[in-house]
Amino acid sequence: MNKNIAPSSIKKWTAVAGAVVILLAAILASMLLYPQSSQGYEATTWAMGSYIQQTLYGSGTEEAATQASSAVNELENLISWRVADSDIEKLNSAAGADWLELDERTINILEQAVSVAEATDGAYDPTVLPISSLWNFDSDEPAFPGDDKIQEFLPFVGYEFLRINTEDNTASLRNHGNGVDLGGIGKGAACDAALKVYKESSISGGIIAVGGSIGVYGEKPDGTDWRISVRDPDEDTQDGLGVLSLKEGCVSTSGSYEKTFIEGDNTYHHLLDAKTGYPAESGLVSVTVVHESGAISDALATACFILGLEDSLPVLKELGASALFIDEEHHITIAGDLEFEQISTAYTVSRQSL
């Protein structure tokens, strides 16, 4: 990637992009939920910038779906740095000054974020806000911020600046200018919040998709495994690349195709390497991670994309996760014990033990 871009570079980005992103989100959500059954209660809502799709079975499904949707909305209002008076907005505003008492749910997610950051040597870093806000991929007109700006704000990124005290549920950021962005873990954490509701309800089974993260609970009426489609990075088709079979747990995918823009001769994606401030260049197109925790699977999907295949393997083993890697050469590597049914013949497949 050429990092020296003239200020006069022409951006190939239009106002239509906003509508396209919403449309693609809907397509992706429908693709991620591989058809499970003709029965079951289905609900679709919107939160965290994504469609929330639920399919529940058994008794009390409508009430459980409503409660799960509320839990996701509550979580967004706690952990989104963009929401006024959220825990994270307050934490960022107090950077370099006060320790703040936060909701226990926020503290738990911050703990999980730091644990993945430590395990991946900062490949996933929850304090990436000083850089992610420069790129502003969630706006209608993201733009290359310039190398000078990136180098100016890069020293403010570092998970060691985030301090947590679980005894009194307080947290702080060491320096003014530090900032937390939980976008790389939030959707997985939302799945965890929904699954907690499912477990406390009377439903027999359920599946929820929040953007690129999916959580499953219990059993389907026919007793078969949950079937989750893996998107083909090259094709927006219902069939997808293949299907993962899962009895329980969570699945999260991070891909370089999700949020992109073109400026000059360069295409930029939103998966930023916190060490360089630029989109990661690991030779991968997407990573799908399976873990019992949605938050961990989400953060690991980002981390593994940035680390690349080889450096990801010891991390997956340490944290008890499995993953499916898709590289730029149209090769799929299945790391760990995953049941995967290939559909697309455009890819070669190999397995890697952990």
Image (cartoon, helix red, strand yellow):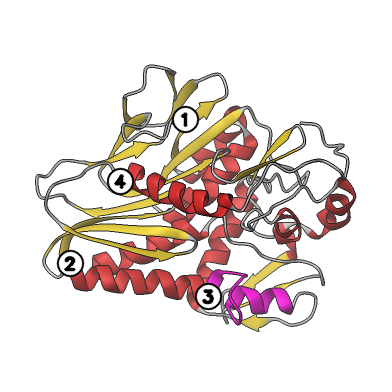
According to the image, label 1 marks what residue? 354
- Other residues around mark 3 within 10 Å, as few (<14) / some (14–19) / many (≥20): many
According to the image, label 3 marks what residue? 78
N-term-proximal mark, 4 vs 3: 4
Determine whether the residue tagged by mark 3 lies in a helix, strand or loop. Answer: helix
N-term-proximal mark, 3 vs 2: 2
Question: Which tag is nearer the camera, tag 4 or tag 3?
Answer: 4
Question: Is any atom of residue 201 visible in this view?
Answer: no
N-term-proximal mark, 4 vs 1: 4
According to the image, label 2 marks what residue? 61
Question: Is any atom of residue 309 visible in this view?
Answer: yes
Q: CA distance from mark 4 to mark 3?
A: 27 Å
Are the two marked residues, 3 and 2, in contact with CB atoms closer than 8 angstroms? no
N-term-proximal mark, 1 vs 3: 3
Are the two marked residues, 4 and 3, in contact with CB atoms closer than 8 angstroms? no
N-term-proximal mark, 4 vs 2: 4
User: Which residues make up the magenta segment?
Assistant: 79-93
- Other residues around mark 2 within 10 Å, as few (<14) / some (14–19) / many (≥20): many
Q: CA distance from mark 4 to mark 1?
A: 27 Å
| Residue 214 falls within the magenta-colored stretch | no
Amino acid found under the numbered disc labelled 3:
Leu
Is the residue 287 above or below the residue 28 in the image?
Answer: above
Amino acid found under the numbered disc labelled 1:
Leu
Determine whether the residue tagged by mark 1 lies in a helix, strand or loop. Answer: loop
According to the image, label 4 marks what residue? 33
For image coordinates 87% across by 37% down, the residue present is 4
| Residue 85 falls within the magenta-colored stretch | yes
Amino acid found under the numbered disc labelled 4:
Leu
